[in-house]
Image (cartoon, rainbow, N blue to C red):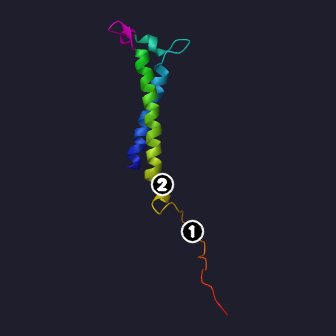
Amino acid sequence: MIYILGIVVILASVLLILAVMVQNSKGGGLDSSFGAVSQIGNVAQSTETIEKATWYLAAVIAFVCLISVFIGNPASTNGGQQSQIGSSPVNTTTTTP
């Protein structure tokens, strides 16, 4: 399960990189190269679509990372207490004279 989440994060990261590179910045971006895509029904929607995709991909990465912390954390399986390897147990018995 954790491997599937890792693959989802990697794919979303690659798509996020591509979405950021395609966005139209101040000096122009790769978005201007795709003139046919930007004119859908005589409305320039590619900029809004790419911006929404950027936010959705960032949200997917954040959500999957949070889920993977809860799934892959071994401390959550033993009640939140981490095991202490090599420590001696504490003697709790008391002797009365």
Residue 23 disc label: none
Helix, strand or loop for disc 1: loop
Q: Quadrant of residue 93?
A: bottom right
Check disc 2 and report the residue beneath it.
73
Task: Kindly identify the residue that appears in the image at 45 percent across and 52 percent down.
Answer: 72
Residue closest to the far top: 42
Is disc 2 in contact with disc 1, using a CB cutoff of under 8 Å? no
Does residue 23 appear anywhere in the picture? yes
Task: Kindly identify the residue that appears in the image at 43 percent across and 21 percent down.
Answer: 50
Q: Amino acid at mark 2?
A: Asn
Helix, strand or loop for disc 2: loop
Which circle, 2 or 1, is nearer the viewer? 2
Q: Amino acid at mark 1?
A: Ile
Q: Number of callouts in the render? A: 2
From which residue to which does the magenta span run? Answer: 35-45
Q: Indicate the position of residue 19 as horizontal and vertical percent values.
A: 45, 24
Q: Indicate the position of residue 78 as horizontal and vertical percent values.
A: 47, 63
Task: Kindly identify the residue that appears in the image at 45 percent across and 34 percent down.
Answer: 59
Q: CA distance from mark 2 to mark 1?
A: 17 Å
| Direction from residue 47 to residue 90 in the image, left or right | right
In the image, residue 97 sits, relative to residue 52, either above or below, namely: below
Q: Indicate the position of residue 26 as horizontal and vertical percent values.
A: 56, 13
Does residue 13 appear anywhere in the picture? no
Check disc 1 and report the residue beneath it.
85
